[in-house]
Image (tube, grey):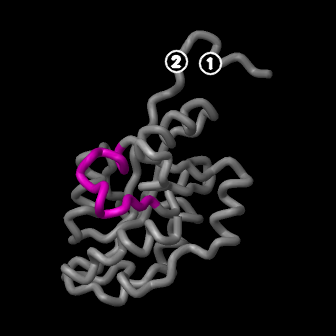
Amino acid sequence: MQAIQLAAGDAFRDVGMSSVAESPPLPAESLSGYREAGRAWVAVDDHDDPVGFVVADVMDGAVHIEQVSVHPAHARQRIGAMLLDHVAGWAARRGLPALTLITFRGVPWNAPYYERLGFRELAQAELTPGLAALWAAAPGAGRRGGGSERVCMRRDVPPDTRPGADAKP
């Protein structure tokens, strides 16, 4: 998963954000923790090789997307969208009403892409305490101008309406 994140991050060089491209990937221990907690999902190709992944936390009553990456060789195949749809289904089955994430406003495959997938930018007053803390700690948070401004986004998740979905074990 680290190799996928590094390869996907390299595209930031093309938009003048080399510091993002040079950022280290999520540590292996962190990725293992997500996997062990059941909050890591991987997309594979026809040869069962990983081509994309998403890891998430449950924060402030919603699912927060910590990282989603797709290897550039597999871009534009809706892999990221499918991973996010899968996480949305996971959230719905747990009664969690939304997905959140923090991303770059002016990078075409960031905020504009997530808007096409049903996310909307949150106003400052809409931020939950945990999301506000993550956003405040993010490089570029709130800075105006350029693509490096980070924004918080939310996608509402419809409730799970399958028969028996509301049954409690």
Q: Amino acid at mark 2?
A: Thr
Residue drawn at 31 percent across, 43 percent down:
118
Q: Quadrant of residue 84?
A: top left
Q: Quadrant of residue 28?
A: bottom right
134 horizontally vs 102: left or right: right
Front residue of this view, candidates 109 and 105: 109
- The residue most toward the front is 47
Residue 16 image point, x, y percent: 21, 86
Q: Is residue 23 above or below residue 37?
A: below
Q: Quadrant of residue 108?
A: bottom left
Dot 1 alpha-carbon crowd within 10 angstroms: few under 14, some 14 to 19, many 20 or more:
few
Q: CA distance from mark 1 to mark 2?
A: 6 Å
Name the element at disc 2: loop
Name the element at disc 1: loop
Q: Are marks 1 and 2 in contact (CB under 8 Å)?
A: yes
Label count reads 2
Q: Circle 2 sits on which residue?
A: 161
Q: Is residue 84 visible?
A: no
Front residue of this view, candidates 93 and 98: 93
Does the magenta run of residues contain 9?
Answer: no
Image disc number at residue 78: none
Q: Circle 1 sits on which residue?
A: 165
Residue drawn at 40 percent across, 87 percent down:
22
Residue 46 image point, x, y percent: 41, 42
Dot 2 alpha-carbon crowd within 10 angstroms: few under 14, some 14 to 19, many 20 or more:
few
Residue 106 image point, x, y percent: 21, 71
Q: Which residues are magenta?
A: 68-81
Q: Amino acid at mark 1?
A: Ala
Residue drawn at 36 percent across, 74 percent down:
9
Residue 100 image point, x, y percent: 46, 54
Q: Is residue 160 visible?
A: yes
Residue drawn at 51 percent across, 34 percent down:
89
